[in-house]
Image (cartoon, helix red, strand yellow):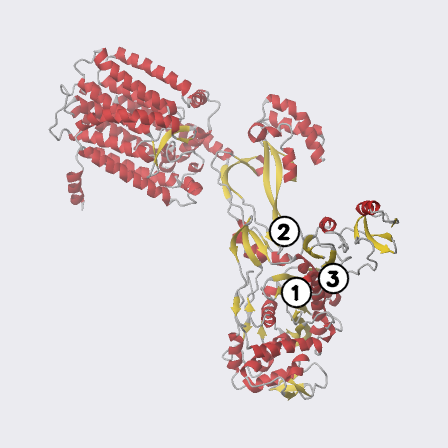
Amino acid sequence: MFLLIAIIALTAMGKVFYLQVAEGGKWTRIAEEIGLRYRTVPATRGNIYSDNGSILATSLPFYRVAMDPTVADTEVYSKGLDSLANLLARFFKDQTATQYKRQINDARVSGRQYIILNKNLIKYPDKKIMAQWPIFREGRNKGGIIFEKVDRRVRPFSYLGYRTIGFINENQQGAGLEFSFNDHLAGKDGSALFQRISGGRWKPVYDGTEVKPIDGYDLQTTINVNIQDVSEAALLQALVEHDAEYGCVVVMEVKTGEIKSISNLSKSGGKGRYREVFNYAVQGLNDPGSTFKLFSMMALLEETPMRLSDSIDTGNGQYKYYNSVMRDHKPGGYGKITMREAFEISSNIAISRKIQDYFGHNPQRFIDYLKEIGLGSPLGFQITGEGNPKIKDPKDKSWSGITLPWMSIGYELELTPLQVLTFYNAIANNGALVRPILVKSVKKADRNIENYHADVIKRRICSSSTLKQIQQLLEGVVERGTAQNIKNAHYKIAGKTGTAQRIKDGRYSRSYYTSFVGYFPADKPKYSCIVIIDDPKGFRQYGSNVAAPVFKEIADKIYSIDLRMHAPWMVSKPEDQALPVIRAGYRDDLDLICKNLKIPVEDRPTDPWVITQAKNQYVTYENNDIIPGIVPNVAGMSLRDALFILENQGLRVNYRGNGRVVDQSQKPGSKALKGSTIYITLS
Amino acid sequence: MNIALKSWADRNLKGDPILWAIVFLLSVISVLVVYSSTETLAYKSMRGNTEHYLFRHGFLILLSLIAMWLAHRVDYRYYSRISTLALWVSVPLLMYTWLFGTRLNEASRWLTIPLIDTSFQPSDLAKLALITHLAAMLSKRQQNINDIKETLIPVLMWTGVICGLIAMSNVSTAVLLFSTSMIVLFIGRVPVHYLFMLMLVGLLAGGVAFKIGERGDTVINRVKDFVNPQEIPYQAKQSYIAIAKGGITGKGPGNSDQKDFLPHPYSDFIFSIIVEEYGVIGGTFTILLYLALLYRSMLAASKSENAFGGLLAAGLSVALVIQAMINVCVSVGLLPITGLPLPLISMGGTSLLFTGLAVGIIISVSRGETDQIKTGFRGGNTFKRAAA
């Protein structure tokens, strides 16, 4: 018995030797040929959505059509090959049916188990259709069809907010939301056994050991497509007009701290060409210039007995601190002015002298005040790479006698545009300093995985009397001061201009960093916004005439979009109430009504959509042109008609009331941005 | 230290010390190879927590050693009494498993024990029970071994029923158990013409299993694959590659590549992984350990004071080592693919425990009789010649 088993054992060992020695080479070669390897199956990346659910970035699956022609049994194969080749030729339109037929048949005859039928990727709906084609419809195991999924990142709004949406490359480097929220978006890759086949491609082996990938989460951002579009357009226009180096715009909702738009454009490749290549708003540190005077005024009002009515002599517009001369904008100087006037006209000498008077003996107190309100530290914004503010300390080696006066007017320190905006937003928000947010939630389908709320960093950054005075000062800048040019009758803007001279080779040059930061409507702040335009050329080089007009244009557009900010503009009522109140609609419908009610119609126009007007005892029609890409006029229509027309233009409709449309938030004739929201009011 | 260890072993580990040593060595190999070969499994189902299977397997090895220790403390003659009960219990268990058990790889071989949530293979219990029972029956009836009614009918009945039930869901285990039973009967001096009858019963039971069982197709396919050398099945191919790449000294612990591609590298094809990582040297050493186990068990059998002990040790050790040899032969391609684990080495829930129990019983036999108990065994050990 034992001997028998020992013989078996010996035989087994003999076979081991045989496999190693006699067939060793063969099996090593086969191992290389089989080329099996576990490869990752990438997870589908999550989407990025705007505030109303429009997709800003998404991964769309595309498919590569491949086939294992050896799988199908003879009957299925010979029956289906001709029509399959026909269908393929008709679909891809690059080879004839005969070529396809030959390609597949050759592969089958020579036993090749993998051929790519076409290099072009197909979309999911096409895949669904293709899966019903002859041979293919037998499936992977009996028909040999192989659809390989390839994900492509798609941005439906192309370059809108490009830098903020961001990107991520294979080396896990990138920018913007794609990079900052990569952990959430990426999901978890799975793995499956793949076999290497000729041409360096990999064919999945379905052996039941696959680990399915876990798809990434979606991001719900606060970006508003309308506002983003408006900001980007206004900024681009100004940059081109002034031939500036770069510019950025951030619009923030005052109460919530939600970033409604963030746009960064830099000159790239010749005049008039701008692209998003760097997120200046979040990362770009710079001397803020005169916009910083707000903080000097706050320090003076909070920490010293100074009043706005106090006056100061700014002399002839030149003032010497040690060896350095500070100048005011107006040649010859402003003479004796009050502090209120000093802020409104942005006098460097007035502000810096007052600061020097009160804090000169103890500059630490000024620095401490700035740090106390939170200016010294980054905001903790959701996008990675936020610039770290640089505020000097009197203990630093670089601190000199002129640091304090220059700092008080916005030099010798660095802040990012977003940081400056956040503090102006606090002024608009009754003193509450809110951390800006860009991502509201991380979602999986309709389920929220993680929610982000606007954190209140500081409930009050100053006393309410200071707040009131600062608000008045900012309104005064537009009413009487440096930004008078953007004053308008419809709503009030509060803000501050800024013009910082750029330092080139250690000297202040004639290149400027212009800005305007503020909020609107001043009496009931809804949005705050900062506009930066760097190095404008030509005769206009100041915050007042470069950046402020951009601010106004954006504010105007937002004001017209956002119904909740203003009283509705009323459609003129028909003079004659004798006829039924039909004002606009579908011509055939209106004809029917008029016919049944026996109302005479003066029938001239031909368009399907018309505007009616009652004239004496007649109803007359006028054409209501519906032009694709242009916001149509829906005034006077019923909700059904208005919805039909507006949604056909790609707009999202938000309505209020019932009856007929009396107001629409996007003006007729303006550009209709697909996916944007239009508010209509009915009564 | 050495002396302390020796005295501890003397006090606690009775029986053949060489058998103990073999078992410990096999356990060490088991832990090493299972740790390496569960890497892929750990990545797949435990998110890369490779220690999960190390700890689980280590724990089971420990449990099986404890089972072994407990079993070797018991006088082996007690087992003859328990075996009848165990046999009666295993019949409904096998039926239940066949009809309602957990399905793995399309074969229902497992019962999941509630509360502790461990899968349990009733065929392991049935195997142990059948061999023990056969040994008991044969040793009792040594005097009238030629009596059909007294001896052959119960023997045939039990062998046929148990093997047939196992064959419903697991043909290879059934064939293995059937052959082992034949060997036990042969050693137990059952006349050869009866053995042929038994073979007939076996074929009959096998035929029934093919018809109504669930593994008929698989058996036919696998045998077909084996006979027709044009098509080497995927598993075999991967196994050959593993063995071919191992060389004389192997790639070193944990360096196997084929463990990623071989299905069940931690059980069915663990021998290929041993050769790949430890080379011909490791493979030979492992096989030698099994041969040594068999040799020492046979020695114990021949020294045993009564027939039951001899038959028991011989039967159990032959079952265990044959299974090991079959596993090895499958790995090297001498036999068609079966799902038999390598006893004492492969990872696996309760089968490790039952193997431990079996080895414990063998060691118990090697201790000789310790208690004064009344047995129905007649006559001394009359088959020393056959065992050798």
Q: Camera-side residue: A680 or A171?
A: A680
Amino acid type, mark 2: Ile
The image quadrant of residue B368 is top left
Tell me the distance, in whole angstroms, between the alpha carbons under discs 2 and 1: 21 Å
First in sequence, mark 2 or 3: give its number.
2
Name the residue that disc number 2 marks: A55
Q: Camera-side residue: A173 or A148?
A: A148
- Crowding at mark 1 (Cα within 10 Å: few <14, some 14-19, many 20+): many
Q: Which mark is residue A249?
A: 1
Q: Which mark is residue A116?
A: none
Amino acid type, mark 1: Val
Q: Is residue B336 above or below residue A355?
A: above
Mark 3 or 1: in front is: 1
Q: Are marks 3 and 1 in contact (CB under 8 Å)?
A: no
Circle 3: element type = loop
Amino acid type, mark 3: Gly
Question: With A474 as the anchor, is B120 left or right in this view?
Answer: left
Whether residue A311 is visible to the viewer of this picture, yes or no, is yes
- Crowding at mark 2 (Cα within 10 Å: few <14, some 14-19, many 20+): many
First in sequence, mark 3 or 1: give its number.
1
Q: Chain of mark 2?
A: A
Q: Chain of mark 1?
A: A
Q: At 16% from the left edge and 14% from the top edge, which residue is drawn?
A: B143
Whether residue B388 is visible to the viewer of this picture, yes or no, is no
- Crowding at mark 3 (Cα within 10 Å: few <14, some 14-19, many 20+): some
Q: Looking at the image, which residue sits at the far left?
A: B372
Q: Which mark is residue A272?
A: 3
First in sequence, mark 2 or 1: give its number.
2
Tell me the distance, in whole angstroms, between the alpha carbons under discs 2 and 3: 29 Å
Q: At 59% from the left edge and 56% from the top edge, which residue is drawn?
A: A221
